[in-house]
Image (tube, rainbow, N blue to C red):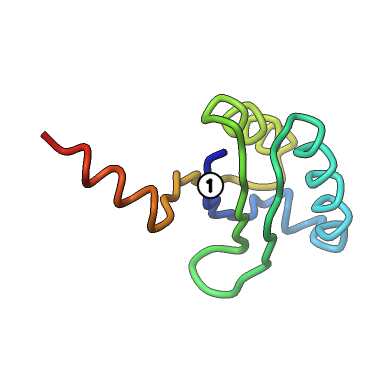
Amino acid sequence: MADYVVLIDYTDQGIRTIERSAERAEVFRETARKVGVEVKELYWTSGVHDGVLILEAPDDRAVSALMLSLVRAGNVRTQTLRAYGPSEMREILDARP
């Protein structure tokens, strides 16, 4: 399984319906589970971005499909980052030519 950090920004539509944000988050969590992605953490944030997701998924394809489903609803835009833990980073560094 791989880890991902997703930065979330509300669209104008998402801001207009902000009161349904927590409800949408629960629907997203269930949708993710159905496609084999675990939402490890979900935060609303202040600052440059409006939210952060920490996901665990079997591969990039599963996360990409899930993110396309999320942004298709029109409430948010996302930036998805593949995240590497310490042991994964050691393996990457050890694999250098």
* Classed neighbour count for the residue bearing mark 1: other residues with Cα under 10 Å, few (<14), some (14–19), many (≥20): many
82 lies left or right of 65: left
Please state the horizontal and vertical placement of residue 19, each as a whole percent of the image.
Answer: 86, 63
Please state the horizontal and vertical placement of residue 12, each as a whole percent of the image.
Answer: 67, 52
Q: Residue at x 62, y 48 (%)?
A: 55
Which of the 4 image quadrants contains residue 9? bottom right
Please state the horizontal and vertical placement of residue 35, each as a whole percent of the image.
Answer: 75, 29
**Residue that lies at the very extreme toward the left in this rendered image:** 97
Please state the horizontal and vertical placement of residue 14, each as a whole percent of the image.
Answer: 73, 52
The one nearer the camera, 87 or 47, is: 87
75 lies left or right of 84: right
Q: Residue at x 43, y 55 (%)?
A: 85
Q: Residue at x 41, y 50 (%)?
A: 84
Which of the 4 image quadrants contains residue 8? bottom right
**Residue type, numbered disc 1:** Asp
Question: Quick one: quadrant of the C terminus?
Answer: top left
* Residue on which disc 1 sits: 3
Which of the 4 image quadrants contains residue 71? top right
**Residue that lies at the very extreme toward the bottom in this rendered image:** 46
